[in-house]
Amino acid sequence: MSVDLGMPSTRGHRLWPDDVLDVDGLRATGWRPRPIRQYILKINSRCNLACDYCYVYGMADQSWRDQPVRMAAAVVGAASRRIAEHARRHRLSAVQVVLHGGEPLLAGPEPVREIVSTVRSTVGAQTAVHFGLQTNGVLLDGPFLAVLAELDVAVAVSIDGGPAANDSHRRYANGKGSYAQVARALHLLRHDYRQLYSGLLCTIDIANDPIATYEALLEFAPPSVDFLLPHANWGTPPARRGAAGGTEYADWLSTIFDRWYASGGRETRVRYFEEIMATMFGAPSRTEMIGLSPVALVVVETDGTLQQVDTLKSTAQGAARTGLNVFDDSMDDVLGHPSIAARQLGHAGLSGTCQSCAVHRICGGGYYPHRYDPGNGFLNPSVYCADLKKLITHIRDTVARDLDTPPPGAAR
Ligand code: SF4
């Protein structure tokens, strides 16, 4: 599909896509958005940690200050009806709902039970609702896990490696590290509630040894590990960077990839690597970090406002806003927003540089918030472009070598 995006000048004042992309014009060409299948419910807007890289509290957007602490029952009810309405209209057999924050466990087990029950009963039996919860793990104890098990809520925990690596960033407001509490929670999750354990999220700090970080995560026997690049963009470049054009992040991830790949992927699943390999062979990507698959998610804030992915809060004040809310607007209205549509355009939604890049089908232009430039918005390559190109090329070359003479056990 060829789409006229009305591209802004490289340093124009109009920001792409919000000031430029004409969604009605796109529809007139026959383009149709994909329905929303993932809902991030911000059930609690505050956190019991004060991680130094947090995009919710510590970066450009400070809108959390205006949000109610908890999601009220009226918001849960309205959000549930909107999810149900959208699922019916688009005949969705399944949707995913992620309980998020702030720290969602601060809501308490009974409110979590109430929220899960309300969504499930409102959506009804014709659409399966798969629940997940993203937590810092500090409050994840036996009684809470028992409730989550009853409700069949999968749990992912954020942890950045061993005690020193984790506690250099993931600390309480008083400066005390969170590792000991998180390790205790992971012990329980791993041994007593394995069926709920979806994996670990690790934000990369290239000051830490990559293999030591990976091995510290493996100690918790995670079913999967997600490595996240620290949020950065062309206005706020990555904090840890060597010489201009350096590729320290690619080198860090490649070191772990080599170890993981040599194990035949048996140690754990690493979604970032698996998705790069899958898209290399033409499969659609299943994460918004990689590839050109349309992104179909929306965030519901505690006050019921509907927002784009909240990592956009790392770019500018109000960057995640849509101006819509669950009381007045449907999920189909969300699909009409330029910023939501922009992430469903595939190749047509990339910058000219990315469109002509040899690895763009795998890279997908990089994670959307990392493309932001205060001068023109999001029609740019990722601020991690050099890293992405190097990592993808490294993975492609490694796999290509194996395809000539596949070593036993390496093929998956
Ligand atoms: S490697 Fe760089 S130029 Fe290529 S698609 Fe990714 S961000 Fe764009």
Image (cartoon, grey):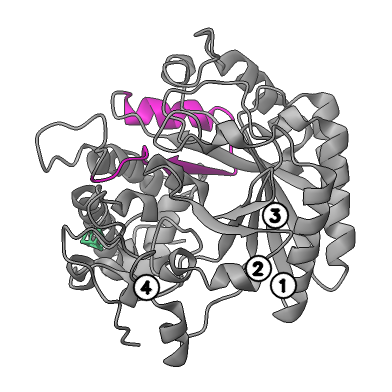
Type of residue at label 1?
His
Q: Would residue 118 appear left or right of 48 to someone viewing this image?
A: right
- Asked whether residue 308 appears in the rendered view, the answer is no
Q: Are marks 2 and 1 in contact (CB under 8 Å)?
A: yes
Q: Are marks 3 and 4 in contact (CB under 8 Å)?
A: no
Q: Residue at x 39, y 69 (%)?
A: 292
Q: Residue at x 22, y 52 (%)?
A: 375
Type of residue at label 3?
Val
- Asked whether residue 165 appears in the rendered view, the answer is yes
Magenta residues span 208-234
Is disc 3 placed on a helix, strand or loop?
strand
As rendered, which of 386 and 236 lies closer to the eye? 236
Q: Residue at x 57, y 31 (%)?
A: 65
Marks 2/1: CA distance?
6 Å
User: Which tag is nearer the camera, tag 2 or tag 3?
Assistant: 2
Res 253 → quadrant: top left
Ligand 1: quadrant of the figure: bottom left
Q: Is residue 130 above or below residue 189?
A: below
Q: Which mark is residue 67?
A: none
Which residue bears the numbered disc 3? Answer: 97
Is-magenta flag for residue 216? yes
Q: Are marks 1 and 4 in contact (CB under 8 Å)?
A: no
Q: Would residue 195 appear left or right of 406 to someone viewing this image?
A: right
Dot 4 alpha-carbon crowd within 10 angstroms: few under 14, some 14 to 19, many 20 or more: many
Which residue bears the numbered disc 1? Answer: 86
Type of residue at label 2?
Met
Which residue bears the numbered disc 4? Answer: 21
Which residue bears the numbered disc 2? Answer: 331
Is disc 4 placed on a helix, strand or loop?
loop
Dot 3 alpha-carbon crowd within 10 angstroms: few under 14, some 14 to 19, many 20 or more: many
Marks 1/3: CA distance?
13 Å
Coordinates of residue 336 in the picture (x, y in percent)? 53, 73
